Amino acid sequence: MDDTELKGIYERKAVAVQSQLQVAWIFSMIEELCEKSTASEDFRFQLTGFSQQIVAAKKFKVGELKLFPLTDSLSKISKIASTDNTSIVLATCKGVQYSISQPAGFKPDDLKDDKKKDSRAVIPFWWVKPATADQDVNMHLSEVKASFWAASVWCLTNSEALKPNDVLLMKPASSSSSGNKRAKKS
């Protein structure tokens, strides 16, 4: 192997390591933001028949409630290909856009198995459903920026004052114009 081949291998590995560091940084940033911003007593999960929803458990002023897209594995944070015009961008780091996938959900049998019970999480961000009418929307995507590595994460923030038992609803993705959908390149 000559020096040019070795340099090429080194550069490819350096890019891969840099990408893995960015994913780890995004994951850590979201975990920290979750810990600082929302307490479990701020909302309640409701299961009724076949539907699930999340409701406010207390009053919130506009912009006071923030729900972050936490997930259960680094592998669920994916770099978005430059040709992908459909993915929702939920994080950026050093100019690279990432999508984040929902964590594994609970199944009734998981509660019987201690390993599964401890590895599953219910993350409020993923429980917010699209509203059927625009006037019902009370959550919108907003960007939270970090000073390190030019990183940012999109979270759901209440756009209306909330009262206890208000169902948290967001704008449907098809009608969203918040800038979080990957823009088409010309």
Image: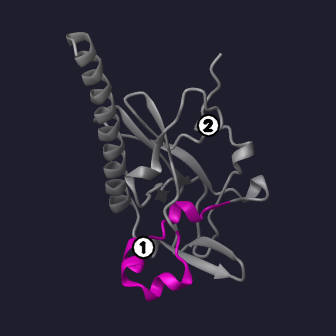
Q: CA distance from mark 2 to mark 1?
A: 29 Å
**Residue reaching furthest to the bottom:** 112
Q: What's drawn in magenta, residue-wise? A: 105-129
Q: Nearer the viewer, residue 161 or 26?
A: 26
* Main secondary structure type of the part rendered in magenta: helix
Answer with left or right where residue 176 lies relative to residue 153.
right
Q: Position of residue 153 (x, y in %)?
A: 44, 44
Measuring 56% from the left and 76% from the top, which residue is drawn there? 45
Q: Nearer the viewer, residue 160 or 113?
A: 113
Q: Return the residue at label 1.
A: 40
Residue 127 lies, with reference to residue 69, above or below; the image says below
Q: Position of residue 89 (x, y in %)?
A: 54, 40
Residue 117 lies, with reference to residue 101, above or below; the image says below
Q: Secondary structure at mark 1?
A: helix
Q: Return the residue at label 2.
A: 181
Comes first in the chain, label 2 or label 1? 1
Q: Position of residue 94 (x, y in %)?
A: 37, 29
Q: Secondary structure at mark 2?
A: loop
Q: Amino acid at mark 2?
A: Lys
